[in-house]
Amino acid sequence: MNEEKNLLRLLKFGLFSASAGLIQVLSFTAMNEWLKWTYWVAYGIALTLSVVWNFTFNRKFTFRSDANIARAMGLVALYYLAFTPLSTIGGDTLTKAGWNEYLVLAITMLLNFATEYLYQKRVVYKGKIDTAK
């Protein structure tokens, strides 16, 4: 049963991350194509929008946690204090080297998905999974 729960949790995280990814791609595309903003500005804003969306739904439906919202969001913010500069600088460097913006975005989003799931499960909601009523 525990394996099934973990698989279902990963599936839920994947689906909510996909919806957040859609928000990120659409907002990034709007800023990149229509507004012609630089990669790092468009990426930063799009990432922020997707993080807020993803956090909200994963806390309630994926991890079903009654963990303190401020503490949980603070821990997520710590993750993004590391992930955002690394992915922004790396992405900006790759795009300036001629890599396609959307390929860089896709790679970054996949790295974000894998590392954030593990971080949320093992750090943010450790001991507080399935505690919501």
Image: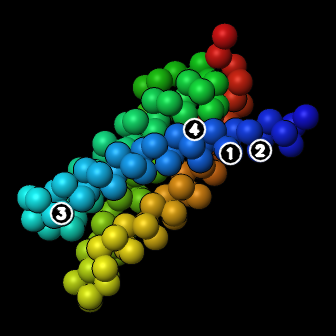
Q: Amino acid at mark 2?
A: Leu
Mark 1 or mark 4, whichever is nearer to me: 1
Q: Amino acid at mark 4?
A: Val
For the N terminus, the quadrant is top right
For the C terminus, the quadrant is top right
Q: Amino acid at mark 1?
A: Leu
Residue furthest to the bottom: 97
Mark sitting earlier along the chain (2/3): 2
Kindly report the distance in space between the C-alpha atoms of the residues bearing marks 4 and 2: 19 Å
Q: Which mark is residue 7?
A: 2
Which class describes the residues within 10 Å of circle 3: few (<14), some (14-19), or many (20+)? some
Please give the residue where the numbered disc 1 appears in the rendered image.
Answer: 10
Which class describes the residues within 10 Å of circle 4: few (<14), some (14-19), or many (20+)? many
Which class describes the residues within 10 Å of circle 1: few (<14), some (14-19), or many (20+)? some
User: Under tag 2, what secondary structure?
Assistant: helix
State the image coordinates of residue 37 (x, y, percent, origin top left). 11, 63
Please give the residue where the numbered disc 3 appears in the rendered image.
Answer: 32
* Res 106 quadrant in image: bottom left
**Given contact means CB atoms under 8 Å apart, are the residues at marks 1 and 2 in contact?**
yes
State the image coordinates of residue 26 (x, y, percent, origin top left). 29, 51
Q: In terms of depth relative to the viewer, which is nearer, 56 or 106?
A: 106
79 lies above or below 13: below
Mark sitting earlier along the chain (3/1): 1
Kindly report the distance in space between the C-alpha atoms of the residues bearing marks 3 and 1: 31 Å
Q: Which mark is residue 87?
A: none
Q: Which residue corresponds to the image point at 50% horizontal and 30% vertical from the top-left?
A: 57
Q: Amino acid at mark 3?
A: Asn
In the shown orientation, is residue 9 left or right of residue 94?
right
Would residue 120 be visible to someone looking at this image?
A: no
Kindly report the distance in space between the C-alpha atoms of the residues bearing marks 3 and 4: 32 Å
Colour convention of the picture: rainbow
